[in-house]
Amino acid sequence: MGGNRNKTALRRHVLQTRDAIPCCERRERSQRICHELIALLDVLTASRAATSTVAVYAAMRSEVDLDAFILGAYERGCRVAFPCMQEGQTHQVMCMRAVSAHDYRENTAPFIVHPVASFEPASGEADRFPLVLPSEIDMVTVPLVAFDPQRSRLGYGGGNYDRYLPDLRPDCLVAGVAFAEQQVERVPTEPHDRPLPRIIAG
């Protein structure tokens, strides 16, 4: 219980700190982070003959805004997938669904408009927003609340990425993204927690 209380208190503190960053500053720093992600993507796509699949997220509240990176991925011909929550037997389960550049720009994907709501595809929506298997993903950007010098990640408490990341291919490029203010001395961890391979902090 103590570990959970520590995580809750740390989460609250870091989110308040992140929220306090002025909007214009968050926007500029998000752009810089996106430029670093695009550089990684360019290296990735240069070494591949096939179309690359990139998993991203739609920013909520004061998260790093990936819009410039997402548009850059579309411009490079990538297939772009977004998190989608679906009902499991005991809790929601996160999957990834591909979204076309048109649907992204028009903001018509229900699971982007309401990212924490469960999405059950209506007629035609399963084809419009096809499932993307973890084994198909070449690069994934991971949101986070806090991180430490060992690249340990504190998420929002749902465990979605903790469950999802181990299913990715070993060669998938995984990058956590955050603002520098989100770094803490130490993130409370449990035995099953694994650090992220890289974190881009702006």
Image (cartoon, helix red, strand yellow):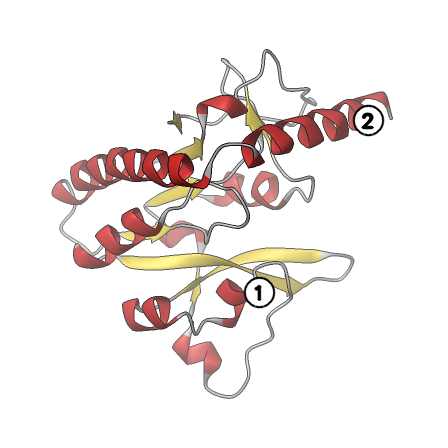
Residue 1 left/right relative to 150: right
Image position, residue 56 (x, y; %): 40, 50
Residue 90 image position (x, y, % from top left):
78, 58
Please tell me which residue is depicted at 58% across the width and 33% down the height of the picture. 145
The answer to whether residue 169 shows anywhere in this view is no
Disc 1 to disc 2, C-alpha distance:
28 Å
From this viewpoint, which residue is outermost toward the bottom? 123
Say whether residue 172 is left or right of residue 150: left
Q: Where is residue 69 in the image (x, y as percent from the top left)?
A: 29, 47
Label 1 Cα crowd, 10 Å radius (few <14 / some 14-19 / many 20+): some
**Residue 154 sits above or below residue 151 on the image:** below
Residue drawn at x 47%, y 35% is 22
Q: As drawn, is 49 to the left or to the right of 139?
A: left
* Among numbered discs 1 and 2, the one appearing first in the sequence: 2
Q: Which mark is residue 25?
A: none
Disc 2, SS: helix
User: What residue lies at 68% left-to-right and 44% top-to-bottom?
Assistant: 158
Residue 12 vs 114, above or below: the answer is above
User: Mark 1 sits on what residue?
Assistant: 114
Q: Mark 2 points at which residue?
A: 5
Amino acid at circle 1: His
At horizontal 77% and vertical 22% (from top left) the residue drawn is: 6
* Residue 83 x, y percent position in the rendering: 50, 56
Q: Quadrant of the N terminus?
A: top right
Q: Tell me if 20 is positioned left or right of 178 in this view.
A: right
